[in-house]
Image (cartoon, rainbow, N blue to C red):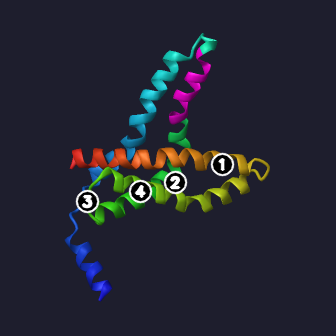
Amino acid sequence: MTEMIKMTEERDAPPIRPLAFISALALAPATIALPCLALALLVGPGDFANVEASFLFFVPFVAMFLGAPTYLTFGAYALHSALRRRHSTAWQFARQGLRAHLTSMPLAIIIFTLADPNTAVQFTAGFFLLGLIFAPLWSAIFANLYRRMS
């Protein structure tokens, strides 16, 4: 009986627009990273007093590349599933993004350990903390972008 309900819900789900989905998926991290990179470059060069501010503005740009593999795999699946389940608020998408990040952590631990066992703990902790911030943020931005594009 439950399977019939799920099949009916999936059949009644609105079609996902591929171009809007891919565009929103790619643009969500860039909407945070590129303005922060511009601010980092404006604040940082030549002034040692603003090194900390420049570094903080540079973090989202780096996070965009560090989180790209899991965002484009685990995150894309979670966001696609959220659309199929008719999630409509940015908060629902943010929760899906956080769940995707937490689901990807075992794989990240394995990869970091295989790459360099001596620094695996540091990389895993950094990846985990950056993901706690950026996975929900990017997912919420994705929801808004997708809604505007479709």
Q: Position of residue 78 (x, y in %)?
A: 41, 60
For the question of whether residue 73 can be seen, the reply is no
Please report the residue visible at 60 percent of the width from the left and 23 percent of the height from the top. Answer: 52
Q: Amino acid at mark 1?
A: Ala
Query: Counting residues from the N terminus, which is met first, the one under dot 2 or under dot 1?
Result: 2
Q: Position of residue 5 (x, y in %)?
A: 26, 81
Q: Nearer the viewer, residue 68 or 137?
A: 137
- Above or below for 69 versus 15: above
| Magenta stretch in the rendered image | 50-61
Residue at the disc numbered 1: 125
Q: Determine contact: label 1, label 4, CB under 8 Å.
A: no
Report which residue position mark 3 lands on.
Answer: 16
Q: Is residue 15 left or right of residue 60?
A: left
Q: How many marks?
A: 4
Q: Disc 3, disc 1: CB below 8 Å?
A: no
Label 4 sits on residue: 95
Q: Which residue is mark 2?
A: 70
Label 2 close to label 1 by CB (< 8 Å): no
- Whether tag 4 and tag 2 are in contact, CB under 8 A, the answer is no
Q: CA distance from mark 2 to mark 1?
A: 15 Å
Q: Main SS type for the magenta part? A: helix
